[in-house]
């Protein structure tokens, strides 16, 4: 093939790529609805370093302040990026953070910390396209501050109150758990003194199935304090940092026997 034909083929491929980028097979993230990053998380109650890292490292997929690099105008890369943005906003949209309840914010903060501990975010496929998305150790440390370790390790708590625990369960746990049916997590009626990984038909992680844990009060408290520390490799990322809330939630679970 001559140089002229090669040039024509290259120009044709570029034109086709730019034209195909006008199609949105995974949905249209509406790039023209662009929010300023300066307004993200303005009144959020979180450490400054955590806030800055969330905006710098997570806002491209998890807010309406997405920065669209020049290569996002060429298909099929444009489709991959649009898919990541749409899915990211579904799970967490920092543009709407201040509209969430305090309980929902705490759940999401715990999920962020869990994802960082596991090395799940940002995903490998995203880092292959966006090299700058890699989290440095300082970035990881900043995000880990969303769930302060000194709160999680506190021990002082009054005896649990099952009614408060029921309210807490309804606010924070029903996204993944129900009392009598399996969801993302197994059903929780009868969990007290049940052996971990023993609900028939539920797809537990191998770490939970092989843990040998029985859900006593002490083990439930350890589990809700730090799931990763108690059973490394488990799939659950939700924790309850405040001792009194753990005590109340465990009292509620005990009452379901």
Image (cartoon, rainbow, N blue to C red):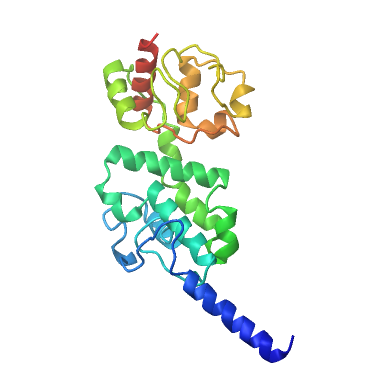
Image quarter for residue 67?
Answer: bottom left
Q: Residue 101: horizontal and vertical position, in percent?
A: 26, 41
Asked if residue 208 lies left or right of residue 242, the reply is right
In the image shown, does 81 or 160 lie closer to the viewer? Answer: 81
Query: Residue shown at 30%/21% (left/top)?
Result: 166
- Determine the residue located farthest toward the top in the rendered image: 257
Asked if residue 184 lies left or right of residue 161, the reply is right
Q: How many marks are shown on the rendered structure?
A: 0
Is residue 178 visible in the rendered image? The answer is yes
Q: Residue 202: horizontal and vertical position, in percent?
A: 54, 23
Query: Residue shown at 53%/73% (left/top)?
Result: 17
Image quarter for residue 154?
Answer: top left
- Determine the residue located farthest toward the right in the rendered image: 1
Is residue 44 visible in the rendered image? The answer is no
Q: Quadrant of the N terminus?
A: bottom right
205 versus 43 height, above or below: above
Q: Residue 68: horizontal and vertical position, in percent?
A: 43, 69
In the image shown, does 217 or 257 lie closer to the viewer? Answer: 257
Q: Residue 5: horizontal and vertical position, in percent?
A: 67, 87
Query: Residue shown at 49%/25% (left/top)?
Result: 222
- Determine the residue located farthest toward the bottom in the rendered image: 4
In the image shown, does 91 or 39 lie closer to the viewer? Answer: 91
Query: Residue shown at 52%/50% (left/top)?
Result: 121
Image quarter for residue 253?
Answer: top left
């Amino acid at each position: 093939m001559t140089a002229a034909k090669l040039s024509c083929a290259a120009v044709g491929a570029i034109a086709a790529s730019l034209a195909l980028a006008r199609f949105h097979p995974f949905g249209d993230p509406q790039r023209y609805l662009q929010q300023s990053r300066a307004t993200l998380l303005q009144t959020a109650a979180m450490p400054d370093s955590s806030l800055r890292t969330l905006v710098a490292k997570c806002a491209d997929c998890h807010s309406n302040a997405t920065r669209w690099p020049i290569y996002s105008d060429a298909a099929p890369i444009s489709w991959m990026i649009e898919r990541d943005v749409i899915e990211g906003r579904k799970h967490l949209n920092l543009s709407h953070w201040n509209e969430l309840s305090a309980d929902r914010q705490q759940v999401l903060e715990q999920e962020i910390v869990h994802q960082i501990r596991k090395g799940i975010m940002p995903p490998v496929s995203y880092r292959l396209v966006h090299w700058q998305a890699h989290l440095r150790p300082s970035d990881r440390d900043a995000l880990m501050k969303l769930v302060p370790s000194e709160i999680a390790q506190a021990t002082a708590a009054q005896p649990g109150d099952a009614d408060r625990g029921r309210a807490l369960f309804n606010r924070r746990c029903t996204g993944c758990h129900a009392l009598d049916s399996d969801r993302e997590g197994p059903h929780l009626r009868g969990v007290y003194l049940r052996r971990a990984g023993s609900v028939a038909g539920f797809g537990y992680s191998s770490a939970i199935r092989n843990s040998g844990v029985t859900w006593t009060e002490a083990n439930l408290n350890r589990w809700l304090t730090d799931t990763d520390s108690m059973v490394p490799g488990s799939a659950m990322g939700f924790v309850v940092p405040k001792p009194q809330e753990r005590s109340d939630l465990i009292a509620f679970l005990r009452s379901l026997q």
